[in-house]
Image (cartoon, rainbow, N blue to C red):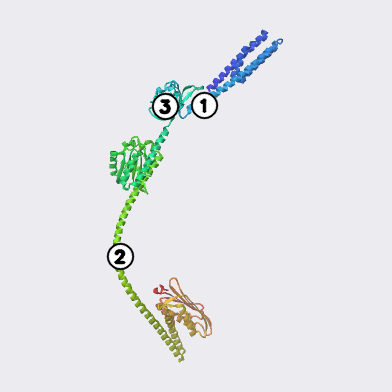
Amino acid sequence: MIRIKFEEQKEKHKIMVISILLAIACFLIYYFHAVLRRDVVFPHFFYIPIILASLWWKRKGLVVAIFLSALLILTHIFFMRDVATVNDYLRAIMFIVIAFVVSTLSEMIAKTEMKTKLAYAELEQIFHTAADGLCVIDKDFNLIRISSAFSTLSGVKKDEVVGKKCFEMFPGILCHTPNCPLIRIFGGEERVESEVEKERNDGTRIPCILTTTPFRAPDGELIGIVQNFKDITERKRAEERINHLNRILKAICNVNQLITRIKDRDRLLQAACDNFIETRGYYNVWIALLKESGELVTTAEAGLGKQFLPMVEMLKRGELTDCGRKALRQLNVVITKDPHSICSDCPLSSSYSGRGAMTVRLEYDKKVYGLLSVSIPRELSADEEEKTLFKEIAGDIAFALHSIELEEKRKRVEEALRKAHEELEMRVKERTVELTVANEQLQREITERKQIEEQLKTSLKEKEVLLKEIHHRVKNNLQISSSLLDMSSLRIHDQQAIDLITDARTKIHTMALIHSQLYRSERFDQIEMESHIQELVSYLSEVYAEKKSITPVVEVSSIYLSIIQATPYTLVINELISNALKHAFKEGQKGMLEISMKRSAEDTIFVRVKDNGIGIPDEVNIFKTDSLGLKLVRNLVEKQLQGKIQVKRNKGTEFIIEFKILEEEAKYV
């Protein structure tokens, strides 16, 4: 704002000066033309406002030259008509030409000055904004210019060093020696580069790359030098970090080799600790193996010596340091940046002065074996890669402990297996002897058994022949009895007696059918009921239904009954079919008789005998009737078959019988 006001004030002064000069010029023209009546005007004065206006306002200043030229010609015309005006015309043209030349040169000079200022401003900005520290020194070793970065780097201000000797302000071991960069440049070298440590006013030293180059005048004359100080602190730290990580990687490789070579737990732990110190990966290392209860198993250390003994005593008491307790509770690495001032309860805190610490639990497959703790440079304690590598080391050691533990278990198992194998071999030998004796005895028993089996087969065959003969003779005897009854009925004229003989003959024939089937069958313990019922129905139809048109319908599944159940069952069926054929239909009446026998999944037999005849009268109760046939049916079903019987009277008579198959029979049927 002040600069703007100053420029405005300066512009007013210029206008004022030009106005005064123009007023003087107007007066001179008027005085020479009007008063003195002379055609020669003092023109040299006119050049002053013309040149000043052209210099100040560039081509805008031509207005002053044009104004004075016009004024000169017009006053000559009005006041001196009789005098030729050629000289004034020439002077007017000269005014304009001079004004044009001066304004053009002024513009060129202004542009050049502007470019110079811009170039200087750019160089000044580059010089002061450069990341590296820059300083310019003349041939007399005087500091003539320093950059802002150099001021920050060295810790000094510009006015404190400019004009002073460089070796006084920044003394070094190379000053006044042939290796001094300034002397080497003055000696003809074009570039000198070296690594130095720049000492600040506060005593700290900053590692830098110093590059020195000549500073020459436009004509090439050497007038000084330019020094570039590049701060490489971060690079040095990165290099140190990389070197440290490389040492850690080397330690990891060595530990892996130890794991494959050493199978003794204590030797492995001590060798691992020694390896970490030998590779200079860590300042000191200690390992403590603990049981799940917290009881100390063993320890190993390197770089601590007798200082570790108080820690061992502390661990034996079941006590842990703060970092140890944290490490056992979490998966991640526990970082302690300043153990010397933070860990007051740690017996090793004095050995960690100026260093950091990392602690992690030794864990593999969800089993915690103990703790691993190391001392490292404090600036690396928060490095993520450092923590990752440290955790990897802990994982390798835990894996080694796991492998050793498995190896010990394997050896114990192998020893137990060896003993068991020896014991088994002994038992096998003993058992072999026993089996040999038993085998000989068994061979004798097998021979005896074969002889007995042959005897049994012979005896069984004889019994089968005998049993068949018995069934055959029983059948023949029953047939003879039936024939005798039939012959007796021919000599009897009493119908009631004939009916009784017929009933007895059918029952005898029914039992004869059973023995006949047993005689024909390969088995003597079961009767196949389907064919048996078919034969029985056919026989009874011939006996009772020769004058009646009755159609029997038989539906019997493939069911086998033992002779114990078959005999009462066939007598029941005989009685029910005989009653239906005798009493259910009148002479000459057509009808149907249905007989069915089925077996359920629960081994229950369902028997159904149904006719569509006249039916049993309602007043007849089969459970209280005096009829011999129905009493026989009821007793056989309930007592011998242990079943149930029911009667339905619906368009005829239907008997439904239900009983269970014997358990012995159910196993085979």
Instruction: Give yes or no for contact between labels 3 and 1 (Cβ–Cβ under 8 Å).
Output: no
Measure the alpha-carbon separation of dots 3 and 1: 24 Å
Residue drawn at x 31%, y 59% is 421
Q: Which residue is mark 1?
A: 122
Mark identifier at residue 432: 2
Residue drawn at x 57%, y 19% is 11
Mark identifier at residue 492: none
Measure the alpha-carbon separation of dots 2 and 3: 98 Å
Which residue is at the front of the view, 272 or 663?
272
Measure the alpha-carbon separation of dots 1 and 2: 108 Å
Q: Amino acid at mark 1?
A: Glu
Secondary structure under tag 3 reads helix
Is 622 above or below relative to 46?
A: below
Instruction: Give yes or no for contact between labels 2 and 3 (Cβ–Cβ under 8 Å).
Output: no
Mark identifier at residue 154: 3
Secondary structure under tag 2 reads helix
How crowded is the residue under tag 2: few (<14 C-alpha within 10 Å), some, or many (20+)?
few
In the rendering, at what x and y percent does residue 160 appear?
42, 22
Compare marks 1 and 2 and give the one earlier in the sequence.
Answer: 1
Q: Amino acid at mark 2?
A: Thr
In the rendering, at what x and y percent does residue 579 appear?
47, 82
**Label 2 vs label 3, nearer the camera:** 2
In the picture, measured across the screen, residue 440 lies left or right of residue 23, that is left
